Image (cartoon, rainbow, N blue to C red):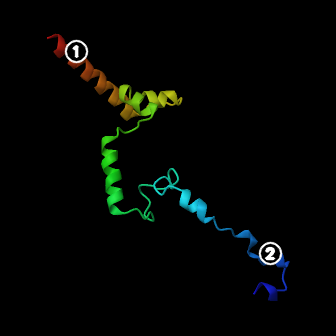
């Protein structure tokens, strides 16, 4: 077909742009380590991993601790801290949470001394 076209140069239609990998390269690759990092996303509906592989991954994830950002860790200590760090006034809910947290700490200290 490429010889009958009258548009463009003949070199555009040649198969020189498509290259197959050599058989020696294919045989050298280890099948297990062949995949790229982050090539499988857990929520990807088009991912073709088997159900057994998905279940095995979920089992591993249950044993892993969840990574938390520094901001999330700080917000557990002081609910108003994230807003103040960003230069904003804390929300009403954050202020109430801080008050409740202070009351609970005071009550625990009181019970600990009694």
Describe the element under mark 1 as helix, strand or loop. Answer: helix
Name the outermost residue toward the left.
Answer: 114
Task: Residue 3: give x, y in percent of width and height.
Answer: 81, 86
Name the outermost residue toward the top.
Answer: 113
The residue identified by callout 2 is 12
Q: Is residue 42 left or right of residue 24?
A: left
Describe the element under mark 2 as helix, strand or loop. Answer: helix
Q: Quadrant of the N terminus?
A: bottom right
Task: Residue 87: give x, y in percent of width and height.
Answer: 54, 29
Residue 71: which disc? none
The residue identified by callout 1 is 109
Q: Quadrant of the C terminus?
A: top left
Task: Residue 62: give x, y in percent of width and height.
Answer: 30, 45
Asked if residue 14 is positioned above or below residue 34 in the image, the reply reads below
Name the outermost residue toward the front.
Answer: 24
Q: Nearer the viewer, mark 1 or mark 2?
A: 2
Residue name at image x 33 percent, y 62 percent: 51
Q: Quadrant of residue 11?
A: bottom right
From the viewer's side, name the closer residue of 22 and 20: 22
Q: Is residue 48 left or right of residue 28?
A: left
């Amino acid at each position: 077909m490429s010889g009958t076209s009258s548009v463009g140069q003949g070199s555009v239609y040649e198969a020189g742009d498509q290259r197959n990998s050599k058989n020696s390269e294919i045989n050298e690759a280890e099948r297990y380590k062949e995949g790229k990092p982050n090539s499988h996303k857990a929520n990807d509906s088009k991912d073709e991993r088997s159900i057994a592989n998905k279940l095995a991954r979920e089992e591993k994830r249950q044993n892993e601790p969840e990574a938390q950002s520094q901001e999330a860790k700080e917000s557990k200590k002081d609910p108003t801290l994230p807003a103040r760090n960003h230069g904003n006034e804390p929300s009403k809910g954050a202020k109430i949470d801080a008050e409740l947290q202070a009351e609970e700490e005071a009550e625990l200290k009181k019970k600990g001394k009694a």
